[in-house]
Structures are given as C-alpha cells and as structure tokens.
Amino acid sequence: MAEQVLASVQTEQWGWEYRGREVVVAERPEPVVPEVPVPAALARLEDKRATADRMRSALTWALGGGVLLTLGVGVLVHTPVALVPAALTVGLGWLGWGRPGLLRRTALREHHRWMTECAESLTRFESDVQRWRHELHDHERAKADQVESVRPWVPVGPATKERVDLYGGTAAGWRAALLVMGGSLMSAGGRLTVLDLTQDSVVEPLRRMAEEHGAPIRATVVPDDSRSLNLLTELSAEEIGVVIAEALRAADHEQTESRGVDAALMQQVAECLVGSPVTFGRLHLAFQVLLRQLTPDQRGELTRAEYAALSDMLSDSARRTAEPRLFRLAAGVKRLAAVSGDVPMNGWDDDDTSLRVVQLSHREPELTAALFSHVIFQIAMSRIQRGQLSGRGERILVIAGADVVARPELERFDSICRRNGLRLVLFFAHLRDSAVELLGGGDAVLFMRLGNAKEAEQAATFIGRQHRLVASQFTYSHGTNTSESTSDSTTRGNSSSTSDSVGTQTSDSRQATFGLLFSRRHRSGSKSSGEQYSSSTTGGSSWSESASNSTSKATNESTSVGYQRTYEYSVEPTVLQGLSPTAFITVDPLDPGSPRLGDCDPRLGGP
C-alpha cells in the first residue's frame, strides 16, 4: 500500500477525487459489403426469351396461315410463286420455335458463367469478412485499453501553500490522510515534522512507510519506554521558564494566577542549575530546596553551589508569599520528572531528516498526557522561534490533536511558523471550543466525518449556501366531456314526363367485285327506306326517411409544477455526518472547483 502511495504522487495531494471514466466512443470500421456480379447479359437474354415465348401463339396462327397460303398459291397460281410464302412460313417457324431454343441455350451458358463469378465473389467476401473481424477486434481492444488506462480517481489537494486545517474524522481517517499527504510531500522533497498528541499513533503508518523506503527519519515517543528522555535539552533558562509555565497553565483551566510570574520564577530556578543540564528531576529537587523540604545532605543530583544558590534565591517573606505558587509548580514538575530522565533529546537541527515525529505515548494517564501534550507544543514553538526547524526545502509542521491547545496559543504558533517559513497543518477531532474560533483562519479547510449534528451544521454553514430552484407546488387536473345528438328526416316526391319522336330513314349501297381466278365483273347493291314513330310517357314517386345519432366524448388532463427560489446549504449537514472514515470535503478559496469531495484511502492510489 505504501509503495502505491509513493508511486502515484508527484505533487502534494491529500487524496483522490472521483471523476469517472471517460466515455470513449469506438468508431467501428465499416463492415464489408459483398460484391455480387450484376447479371446484365443474362437479364437481356431472359427478356428476349420471354418476348419470344409470348409471341409463339401469334406466330403459330401466322404459321398456319402461311402454310395454307403456300398451298393455295402452289395449287391455284403457280408453284414457283409459292416459294415466297413458303420462305415466309419457314421464317415464322424459326421465330416461333428455333429462336427461343437458341436463346434458352445461350441463357444457360450465361447463367453458368454468372454463377462461377458469384462463387468467386463469395470466396473473396468470406476472406474480407475474416480480415474485417480481425480489424474490428483489434480496434475494440485498443479502445478498451485506452478506456482502462484512464483512472477514474484523480489526485486532489489544497491549492494553497499555506496553513491547512482539518476538522473531524476518526483515527483511521487521520492515519490515511497523514499517509497520503505526508508521502506526497516527502516524495516532492519536503521536510515533515509531526506532533502526534492524540495517543492513537495516527502517524505510525507514515513512519513505517518512510522506514521501508529508507527515508531519513527521527521518531521520539514521549515519554519513552525507559522514561529517560530529557525534553529540555538545549533550552535556555528563559525558554524553560516559558515552556513549563505555559504548559502548567494550559493543563489547569481553573488557574487564574499570572503566567508571567510563573515563567519568571521558573527561569530563576533554572538559572541556578548551572552544574549540569537542566532536567525535570533536577528542577523538582530545586523546588524542594526552595520549599525547605531538603537538607544539604538530601540534595541528590544538585551540587553544593546549586543548593546554596537556591537557598538564597528567595527571602523568607518572599518564600512565604510565593509558597502556594511554588507548591503548584513543584507538583507539576514532579509529575513530569516521574516519566523523564537525562538522556538528551536531539535532532531538531538535522536538515537531512525527511520525517521528524514526536509522538505522545498511549500508555500515559489523562492528566500526565494532557500536561505532556502542552509541554511538547511549547517546546516545538520555542525550537521554531530559534530557527531550528527552518532550512532548505519545503518545511511542513503537522499537529495532530490540536484540540487541546487554546486559540491564542495556536494563533501565536501560526504566526511564528509563517515568519520562519513553515507551513502549518492542524488536525482537530471536533469542531467546537477553540476549533470553532479558528475556523476560517487558515487558507484551506478540510472536513472529515462530523458525527455531532451541531458540529456538522457549523461546517455546512462555513461551506456556504447557494440559490436553488425547488418544486414547491404540484397540480393535477382531470376532466371528461360527453355530448350526444339525434336527428330524423323524411322526404317525399312525385314526378312525370312525356316524349314523342318521328323519323324517316333511307339508305342505298352499290358494290363492284372483280375475281382473281376468273376475270369478270359483277355489280351488287341494295336500297331501303323506312319511317319510325315512337311515343313514351314516364312517371313516378319517391319517398325517403333517414335517422342519425352521434355521440362525442372528450377527456383532458393537465399537470403543472410550481418552483420557488430557495437559499440552502451547498452541502447538507447530514452529508458531513455520513461521510466514510477516509472521505473529506475540501474548501479552498484558491480552487475554482471548491468545495470538492475526495477520499484519502491509500488503496485508491493503486493501479
């Protein structure tokens, strides 16, 4: 999984955004069309043969007449003269029976030749079809590979290069977010420092991934297993006074005394410890000396000079006045001394370290863990002020579990980081208390799952609202209209008519005939005349009756929807409550597509 994350990122990213696969329309090659030879000659022959067959009956009668004519001419006229109708008769016979047979045989030969060409064309067509199928398969395979190569999940992250705040989520979601974000920054050459104050080891997957890839890392668990680590290594007396005073005040919300006085008193005590490095154990002994609880023989790790300086630091009246404050400071230092030692905590100045982790141990009780979280925070702020985390390359500092730190301290920490060229990333488990006051103070905001309804509503309000048109009214009407009409009509009528006609007709015809066999003339003719008279009378009556009945029916329906403009959440609170553990919503003023929905599950970065 870690290899997938590093292999899939080239720039900063926090996860992936789903944009779906691109729909690629495969332009299929044109299918092969068979080339069938056109039987033009065969069609002409068939037309000629069909015409000859249709003329056969007429030619039969003509042939019979020709035979009779030939016989008559040969008998009655002269035999040589009969050769003319005989030749005509033979031609008619050939047209009626010889020519159709010839056309039939020619058509058969032409049909055989055409079938041969069709078989050859079919063979070529089958070969072309096989080639077309192979081309189509290769084309579709190439398009499928092109579609598969397009990843539906694309990297997404804040466009800003300044502070980023993350709200909500679970420990599993934070582990995934740190793994993806940290892996991308480290692969781009960034230097990452993580303060894990959650006691849930959310930075552990990122640390293991860095170890597997041979990245230079420095990880510290506070307090460590041997309880021998000295967190105050290389800090000045002034810095020690501020760190402890601020940490004790932040851990005790009911404290009302001046933190400046506490810091000054702690600084004076630290200045007295000059014999060896200052540790929480030596500070506890120093406060016991101030409270007159140790004799010179019980000074332990303190030198005689240190014991003497501490004994003379406060007068009796000043000690009695500051005694409540001393007891409170001594109690806090004692709790810290119980789980720490004198082994130096180094490595803050190492520029070659890609990942630096300070992780709060999950074994410590709540009171000790709360106190140590504030000590770690104050020490980191002091180190940054000294410029120890600055250097070449992009520097990012992540505080996981920033809920425990008050708003003024986080704002001061942010200002210090900006002045020293560090990017600050804050992880808040909840959107309440100081987290609400800081909302929007960064350059980009990420929201993971917020199960609390009030927190989800605050996040939805921050994401913003937008105008929408929503259906507010729906109207449906249904109507039926039926009409029926009936009509009857009756018609009666009488009519009569009379006509007379008179006519006379005369005809005369004559005809002359000359015979072929006998050369003589005769005439024939006829003459006729006649007279015609006719008279007719007609009459009649008519009666008709008709009835008609018509019915019409109409049905109409109508639907109307009314819309109104509303001003609603861009992202509903229920959406934030129902996000998956690794899903998040990014709000970045520099991103035109904001807000964006993403997911930091490392498995999405795989091939």
Image (spheres, rainbow, N blue to C red):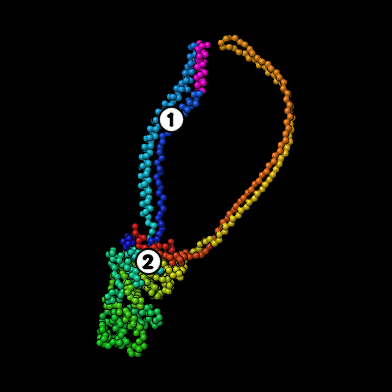
The percent position of residue 368, horizontal first and vertical second, equals 34, 77
Which residue in the rendered view is the most extreme toward the bottom? 317
Query: Would you identify the image quadrant in which residue 313 lies?
Result: bottom left
The percent position of residue 484, horizontal first and vertical second, equals 65, 49
Crowding near pointer 1: few (<14 within 10 Å), some, many (20+)?
Answer: some
Name the mark on residue 42: 1
Q: Is residue 163 magenta?
A: no
Towards the viewer: 22 or 344: 22
Left or right: 540 as drawn, with respect to 359 = right
The secondary structure making up most of the magenta span is: helix
Secondary element under disc 1, as helix, strand or loop, is: helix
The residue positioned 29% from the left and 68% from the top of the image is 217
Q: Is residue 64 magenta?
A: yes
Kindly tell me whether residue 272 is visible in this rendering: no
Kindly tell me whether residue 315 is visible in this rendering: yes
The residue positioned 72% from the left and 22% from the top of the image is 532
Towards the viewer: 435 or 485: 485
The percent position of residue 518, horizontal first and vertical second, equals 57, 9
Query: Would you identify the image quadrant in which residue 212 lies?
Result: bottom left
Name the quarter where the N terminus is drawn. bottom left
Q: Which residue is mark 2?
A: 173
Q: Which residues fall within the magenta stretch?
A: 58-78
Towards the viewer: 112 or 164: 112
